[in-house]
Amino acid sequence: MRMIRILIVDDHASIRDSFRSAFEQYDDLKVVGSVADAAFALFFCRDKQPDLVLMDICTAGGASGLAATEKIKEAFPAIKVVVMTGFDEVTYMPRAKACGADAFVEKGQNMTFFIQVIRDVMDGKSYFPEQKAIPVQPGEAPLTERELETLRLICEGVSRKEIAERMCISENTLYRHIQSVTKKMGFERTGELVAHVILNGWINPRY
């Protein structure tokens, strides 16, 4: 039987302990380390050499599990990463995929589901649920990928000039994206739109 060596990254000790206790019941799962801060995950990968990292997105010290995932996959492509979150943030799943994650699981799933995903990922499979969407006005088309990226960067407080540079578009094109998003969501002012999106938890500007 192949032993799966797992590193757990989560800022809540109770969650880390719950996963450890559950995994210890199986002969093929072994926890080789746990850490609260994703900023230290790469160091633990070098030291513990896990087969798989179970990575929370919002971790201690404001460290992003998505940024840590990207660094781990760049340094150790063979290490599998299962990203998890307890938030309804709509950009987390596609961003996790873009960072090289092998799976994305919501924390509301039961332990049996997590274990199945871990085993599937180690068998070369991936798991990404259906993309969540921010509600728009009746009759309006869903936000496009570019519009969603525009909205995320605005919520993060990035200047319009920098957003245009990051997205490799002109400021005029960016303006049209912003106008489209505000119209679809029924707002006239960008500030009101940003407050609405953040208060509803659809975009988390910190992570």
Image (cartoon, rainbow, N blue to C red):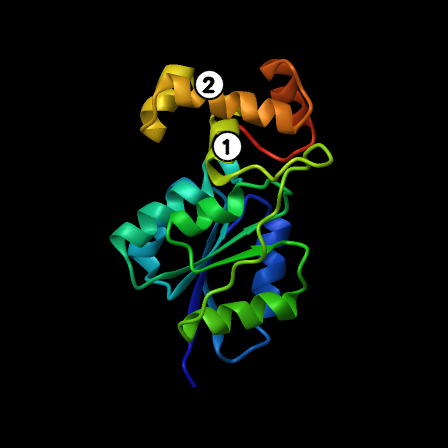
- Mark sitting on residue 175: 2
Q: Residue furthest left?
A: 75
User: 70 and 20: which one is in front?
Assistant: 70
User: 156 and 164: which one is in front?
Assistant: 164
Looking at the image, residue 196 sits to the left or right of residue 123; the answer is right
Q: How many marks?
A: 2
Please say whether residue 175 is visible from this viewpoint.
Answer: yes
Marks 2/1: CA–CA distance: 11 Å
Q: Position of residue 61 (x, y in %)?
A: 49, 33
Q: Residues within 10 Å of mark 1 (few under 14, many from 20)?
A: some
Write down the residue under mark 1: 147
Q: Residue furthest bottom?
A: 1
Can you say which quadrant of the picture contains the N terminus? bottom left
Tag 1, which secondary structure? helix
> Three-letter amino acid code at disc 2?
Tyr
Q: Is residue 131 above or below residue 144?
A: below
Q: Residue at x 64, y 71 (%)?
A: 112
User: 7 and 97: which one is in front?
Assistant: 97
> Three-letter amino acid code at disc 1?
Glu
- Mark sitting on residue 174: none
Looking at the image, residue 149 sits to the left or right of residue 133; the answer is left
Q: Of callouts 2 and 1, which one flags the residue occurring earlier in the amino acid sequence? A: 1
Q: Residue at x 64, y 51 (%)?
A: 14
Please say whether residue 156 is visible from this viewpoint.
Answer: no
Q: Residue at x 48, y 78 (%)?
A: 28
The quarter holding residue 78 reads bottom left
Q: Position of residue 96 (x, y in %)?
A: 45, 48
Q: Is residue 68 above or below residue 202?
A: below
Q: Residue furthest front?
A: 139
